[in-house]
Image: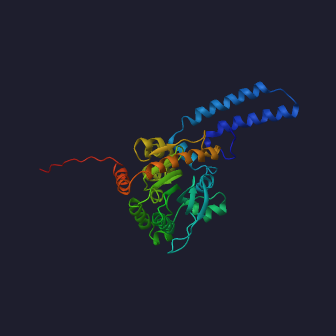
Amino acid sequence: MESPAYTLEFEKPLRDLTAQLDGLRQRSEENQLDLGSEIAAITEKIEATQRNIYSNLTPWQRVQIARHPKRPYALDYIQALCTGFTELHGDRQFRDDQALIGGTAFLNGEAVMIIAQQKGRDTKEKIARNFGMPQPEGYRKALRLMKLAEKFDLPIITFIDTPGAYPGIGSEERHVSEAIAVNLREMAMLSVPTISVVVGEGGSGGALGIGVTDRVLIFENSYYSVISPEGCAAILWKDAAAAPQAASALKLDAHTLEKFGIVDEVIPEPFGGAHHDTAKAAETLSYELQKHLNDLRGLEHDQLLNSRYERFRRLGVYAEDTVVVS
């Protein structure tokens, strides 16, 4: 496995072993030495260490992978999966929000509407895309494109990858909570098939603002949560350093979410994370999207709305108790 330039804390044993392997190979080439047995031993140890690490990831470690700077972003998947992507800009009220992109494209020859949260790679792009945190105009643009998709009977696919909606003063002044709330209401009533995919971070209402869909898919090393682990830790433990404990308490990892019915399917990733083999991750996603689109295309309009309604009504558990006042 190719070692990415950026190494997470729990991956450091792998980095050290890979450095040893590279050193042995270099010595073998430079000095014409037969170090095959030593190279084979280190390679075997690397494979065993990989299995040990990636088969026993904690929720916090999965959060770290979801935030990996080399992880594929929405545009990476769009370019790998779709042809003819034409980005559409602006909410027709304020301005264009580059943290939330969208437009028409063809997926396996079928016209679809793509709506996605997009982060940046370098500093300039991160600032331009506001670190993947949409503002009200982003959600209003998303709704405009959803209505356009409905007009032309296009399925909608959304890519979720945000730490949350932007909480700045300007965002609040332009009513970000209202923009998200309107999206929740309107997405629940769309007449076309809708699928959302959590490809990285799925933070709070910022993620939910494009996530009220017929099917919710999630990559196995992504997370979907009402609050970030750091935010939860700061509130409950009064210390952001308690983020690993908060991540476990929040039940935000993909397989737990599937168990509770929050997501419909977990998409497997290449060993170590999607950033180790983006092409393979995109191929798997393409198959899953097509499978769910085929299922949804077979539903009548009323069936589509009713199943979507029932899907979200099933979320959560509550108990009623009768209090007798004497």
Task: Give me the residue at 49% from left, 43% from top.
Answer: 266
Name, please, the residue furthest toward the bottom: 93
- How far from the left and from the top, in percent, is residue 311? 37, 50
Task: Give me the residue at 58% from left, 63% from top.
Answer: 130
State how many labels appear. 0
- How far from the left and from the top, in percent, is residue 163? 52, 56
- How far from the left and from the top, in percent, is residue 162? 53, 56
| Left or right of residue 27: residue 63 | left
Question: Is there any visible trace of residue 257 in the rendered image?
Answer: yes
Task: Give me the residue at 44% from left, 67% from top.
Answer: 179
Vertical comparison of 30 with 212: above or below: above
Looking at the picture, tell me which residue is in the foreground, 307 or 48: 307
Vertical comparison of 159 with 259: above or below: below
Looking at the picture, tell me which residue is in the foreground, 2 or 244: 2
Name, please, the residue furthest toward the right: 31
Q: Tell me how the rendering is colored.
A: rainbow
Question: Is there any visible trace of residue 163 in the rendered image?
Answer: no
| Left or right of residue 1: residue 36 | right
Looking at the picture, tell me which residue is in the foreground, 130 or 240: 130
Name, please, the residue furthest toward the left: 326
- How far from the left and from the top, in percent, is residue 224? 47, 50
Vertical comparison of 97 with 306: above or below: below
Q: Indicate the quadrant containing the N terminus: top left, top right, bottom left or bottom right.
A: top right
